[in-house]
Image: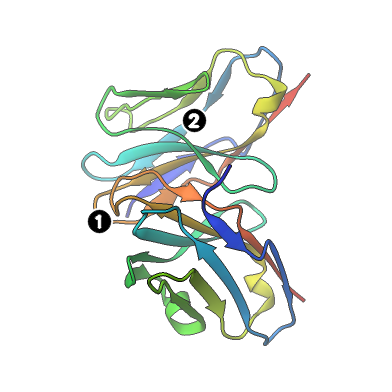
Amino acid sequence: NSKVIQTPRYLVKGQGQKAKMRCIPEKGHPVVFWYQQNKNNEFKFLINFQNQEVLQQIDMTEKRFSAECPSNSPCSLEIQSSEAGDSALYLCASSLQFSNERLFFGHGTKLSVL
Amino acid sequence: GDSVTQTEGQVALSEEDFLTIHCNYSASGYPALFWYVQYPGEGPQFLFRASRDKEKGSSRGFEATYDKGTTSFHLRKASVQESDSAVYYCALAHSNNRIFFGDGTQLVVKP
């Protein structure tokens, strides 16, 4: 059973609406990743954090997404203005350290943008 | 840049067949290599990893050997079961870098 908790499991939004999802990493894991998985099972890296600090992110994330991992609160990923192409499974993963370490994934949030 | 290639998009087998899923990577040095498995409706689960040439990783009857010479980390299982049906991902990680996933291989095992 996954110990990385993602909510909600399903999210339905209209185009232009905000879409926000949350992730509680496994206890004691300071590193958090967000990935987007499309219907062809392809992974796209979005952003990662170590503790509360953003380590890496792609251009799309910087421009259209808002993400944070505050201390003592769930991490969150928010799409400011949803587009049809954002429909995907959003996966949060955590790990003990940043490099070469296995990832523990949540079940994901399935976003549908109508 | 770093990348992972899985040549089979889908593999269809019968129970007790031998499984091979091919994974080749492109990266400098010695990246860590992983296999993950994803069942429907769930996130990927870690199977095992290897980080040195000739190192073998294994779990639940699956195994793969890190081969620096052929830049490969092929997944094998001697006898598959219907419950092994899932999508399998090969992945690569370098120090201070993000993890790169292959496009996945859908395994379908018929009873």
The image shows residue B70 at horizontal and vertical percentages of 33, 28
Label tally: 2
Nearer to the camera, A64 or A78: A78
What number is the disc on residue B33? none
Establish if B45 lies above or below A88.
above
Q: Is residue B68 left or right of residue A40?
A: left
Nearer to the camera, A25 or B55: A25
Residue at mark 1:
B96
The chain carrying label 1 is B
SS category of the residue bearing label 1: loop
The image shows residue A82 at horizontal and vertical percentages of 64, 81
Spatial CA distance of label 1 from label 2 is 26 Å
Establish if A95 lies above or below B52.
below
The image shows residue B86 at horizontal and vertical percentages of 65, 35
SS category of the residue bearing label 2: loop
Residue at mark 2:
B22
Mark 1, other Cα within 10 Å: few <14 / some 14–19 / many ≥20: few
Establish if A80 lies above or below A114.
below
Residue B78: quadrant of the picture: top right
The image shows residue A74 at horizontal and vertical percentages of 49, 68
What residue is shown at x 77% (from left), y 76% (from top)? Answer: A114
Q: Quadrant of the N terminus of chain A?
A: top right
Amino acid type at circle 1 is: Asn
Amino acid type at circle 2 is: His
Share a chain, discs 1 and 2?
yes
Q: Nearer the viewer, mark 1 or mark 2?
A: 1
